[in-house]
Amino acid sequence: MTRPTYLVVGQISHETNVFSPILTGLDQFQGRGLAYKEGLFEVFRGTKTGVGGVIDAVEQARAAGRQVEIIPTIAASAVPSGLVTRDAYAHLLGTLLDGIKEAKAGGRLDGVVLILHGAMVVDGITDAEGDILEKVRKAVGKETPVVSTLDLHGNISEKMVANADAFFGYDTNPHVDPYERAVEATGRILEIIDGKIRPVMAIEKLKMMPPTINMRTAEGPMVRLFTMAREFEAQPRVINVSVFGGFPFADIPEAGSSVVAVTDNDPALAAHIVKTIGQEMWNTRRQFLKPITSTADAVRHAMSPEAQAKGKPGPIILADVADNCGGGGSGDTTVLLQALLDMGAQDVGFAIMWDSEAVRQAEKAGVGGTVTLDLGGQTVPAHGKPVHVTATVKKLTNGEFINTGPMGTGLKVSVGPTTLLQAGGVEIITISNRMAPNDPEIFRHVGIAPEKKTILVVKSRGHFRAGYEPFAKEIVEVDCPGAASPNLSWFEYRHIPRPMFPLDPV
Ligand SMILES: [Zn+2]
């Protein structure tokens, strides 16, 4: 009987917003379901995820008569937030490396398949994935292949490229292909182990870090870039071509967009591909920018009878894109709420304000009671002071509801103890656990019919569109301060290479 091929598998994934003061500790990874060893099979088998893709690809290979075994190590991911703590990182990386060393000592290490993000920043380590791959490389040695899938928002570094055999970046945004890329990566590592291909990689790093607001792959400048990537991939010696928009909330030397190509032992071709697509990306860099509306203009517009009279019935949605928890926003910025109150806006549904202390006070007052409090504005004082309000407690809930929108349909979610506060003409959904209000059920579960409101506020960048667009009259993206603002001039960068588009005139 021939000896099986052993693949060590692990996931360490985080999109770090260095401007968020909310540190990402081990508890935040645990909150999203940290899995160890055999637990990876329990959690991910049958799911359309990266680890699920590896499991399926191995099972398919087995069904085709190939003997392959997975040695699972760890799977960790957390909601985007601030720097990953050193303790959390030491634990995650240590667990992965222990798994690799154990496999090696037992003579069961033929390759490593990783699910990484590319935009993880650890307290004291700007290029976390570069560090992970360097240590993995050291542990496995030069001859053992290491491949990884990566997120389209990864800030890819030379160090990462130097310490891996092949990368497989997501081709879609919103990301609907982590599973497919993991299947691809697994199939390719088996070909490497069998000596059928000898991958070489090239990277073109660009002096641009556009905001993520116009990086969708169905429209805008990414369409052309991914078409070019697919055309190159049709050539026989090309293994994979990935375009990385990057993640701009990273004040690190490795920040920026990039293109990575993997070819079968043809370094010149890989270099040609990344240069060609990189040049096109640079040439079209301005197309990544998208104007957004100032807070005062947005509120004035939403309140104007002319704007309300236009188009189909339904609310005008003000998207507080800068405070999107899914991009590292704190969920408690106040500039837009303050403006709505100051300008006397009426019939407004506001989702969300993250303030567990306010919820506690509302619980004490009870439904129908009145509270006077300083709402929100706790996380980053520069993103707006707490709003001093006297409000009526209209509702108290446990924050649980089931998504009915097209994203995560049927998934039960919880924003923790929640209250609906009425202040002036604004009904504010105040929650205890940070989460972007991507599904309209967050309104319905507190008794608001979102389609009937005059104005809705959602603290979300883009994922809310799937659920809200069908009943919205209009969507206005508002330029408020926040840790996930597409207006990068709000942030003070100290460590990125300069000049850098769009911050510098290039
Ligand atoms: Zn992403």
Image (tube, rainbow, N blue to C red):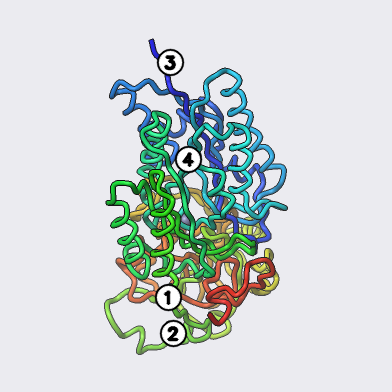
| Dot 1 amino acid type | Ile
Q: Nearer the viewer, residue 291 or 419?
A: 291
Contact (CB < 8 A) between labels 4 and 1?
no
Q: Nearer the viewer, residue 376 or 159?
A: 159
| Dot 3 amino acid type | Arg
Contact (CB < 8 A) between labels 2 and 3?
no
Mark 3 secondary-structure assignment: loop
- Crowding around mark 3 (Cα neighbors within 10 Å: few <14, some 14 to 19, many 20+) is few
Q: Which mark is residue 3?
A: 3
Residue 406 image offset from top left, x and y in percent: 33, 54
* Image: 207 above or below 164: below
- Crowding around mark 1 (Cα neighbors within 10 Å: few <14, some 14 to 19, many 20+) is many
Instruction: Give the residue pinned by disc 4.
Output: 147
Quadrant of res 372: bottom right
Quadrant of res 303: bottom left
Quick check: 102 left or right of 456?
A: right
Say whether residue 393 is visible: no
Residue 17 image offset from top left, x and y in percent: 60, 60
| Dot 2 amino acid type | Met
Which callout, 4 or 1, points at the residue further toward the start of the chain?
A: 4
Which callout, 2 or 1, points at the residue further toward the start of the chain?
A: 2
Could you give the CA–CA distance between mark 4 and mark 2, rounded to whole angstroms? 53 Å
Callout 2: CB less than 8 Å from ligand 1: no
Which label lies toward us, 1 or 3? Answer: 3
Q: Nearer the viewer, residue 442 or 222?
A: 222
Say whether residue 478 is visible: yes
Could you give the CA–CA distance between mark 3 and mark 4, rounded to whole angstroms? 22 Å
Could you give the CA–CA distance between mark 1 and mark 3, rounded to whole angstroms? 64 Å
| Dot 4 amino acid type | Val
Instruction: Give the residue pinned by disc 1.
Output: 455
Quick check: 101 left or right of 217?
A: right
Could you give the CA–CA distance between mark 2 and mark 1, rounded to whole angstroms? 8 Å
